[in-house]
Amino acid sequence: MRRLVDGSWSPGMALPSEGQLASEIGVSQGTVRKALDELAAENLLVRRQGRGTFVAEHDEQRILFQFFKLVRDDGITHFPDSTVVHVEIAGASDAEYAALELKADDQVIRIRRLRSLGGAPLILETISLPERVFPGLADGPVPNNLYSLFARRYGVTIANAREKLKAVVLTTEQADVLQVAAGSPALEIDRVALSLDGSPVERRLSLCLTEEVHYQSDLR
C-alpha cells in the first residue's frame, strides 16, 4: 500500500513477481500472495492470468463497477458523456471545508458539468477539489474520466468513497440546465472520494433524474 501511495507503483505498472517481493520484504511468498489478493479484492490491483499482477487503472469499466451506480431501468450500463458548464477557482463553502478537511486559506477548483446518457441530460454535477492537491487542473480541458487524470497527472488514486443520498426538488436554474420543469424531483448524491491514504480529495454533489434510471448498490 505504501508503494501505491508514494507512486513507486503507478497505474498500469506490472508488479515484480511474488518471489521477488517476498525476497525484498523479507516474508514468505504465501504472505505476499495473500496481501496481493486482498489489494486485488479492493480493486487496487488487477490479476491477469499468465501475465502477472498490475496496478489498477481508472478506466471507464472500473469506474462503472466501483463508483458509478446509476443504471438504466433495462439493466444496461453505460459510462455517461459530460459537458463542462463552468470551471472556477474560489474560496470554499462551509460544506466544502468540512467535506474536504481544508485549511483556512485553501481554495477549491469547482467544476460544474452536465452528464448525459444517449444524448438525454441525466446528472448535474458540482465537483469540488482542493486546489493545492490539483494545481493547474482548472487551466486545461476537463476530461470525462477525471479519476484517470488524477492518477496519471497528480499521482492521486481514488480508493473508495462515501455517499449520502437524499430526495430533492430542482430549483428553476437547476431544472433549466437539466431541461425539465422547475420543482421536478431528483436524487441528490453527495459523495466524498478518498485517496489511498484516506485523505478526502473530491466532493461531488450530483443531482440525478431517475425517470429512466435507478441507483444500484451491490451489497456483499
Image: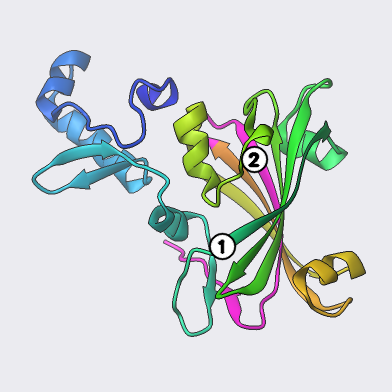
The question of residue 82 being in magenta is answered with: no
Q: The residue tagged with tag 1: helix, strand or loop?
A: strand
Residue highlighted by disc 1: 81
Which residue is the extreme one toward the front? 140
The question of residue 215 being in magenta is answered with: yes
> Closer to the camera: disc 2 or disc 1?
1
Q: Is residue 115 left or right of residue 68?
A: right
Residue 79, placed above or below residue 148: below
Q: Residue 207, position in %: x, y? A: 73, 64
Q: Earlier in the sequence, mark 2 or mark 1?
A: 1
Q: Quadrant of residue 45?
A: top left
Distance between the Cα atoms at labels 2 and 1?
20 Å
Residue 133, placed above or below residue 216: above
Q: What kind of residue is marked 2?
A: Glu
Q: The residue tagged with tag 2: helix, strand or loop?
A: strand
Q: Quadrant of residue 133?
A: top right
Q: What kind of residue is marked 1?
A: Asp
Q: Is 149 or 165 nearer to us in this picture?
A: 149
Determine which of the numbered discs, if any, sits on residue 202 in the image: 2
Q: Which residues are magenta?
A: 195-220
At x 18%, y 47%, the residue is 48
At x 25%, y 36%, the residue is 36
Q: Residue 158, position in %: x, y? A: 50, 40
Q: Residue 40, position in %: x, y? A: 30, 44
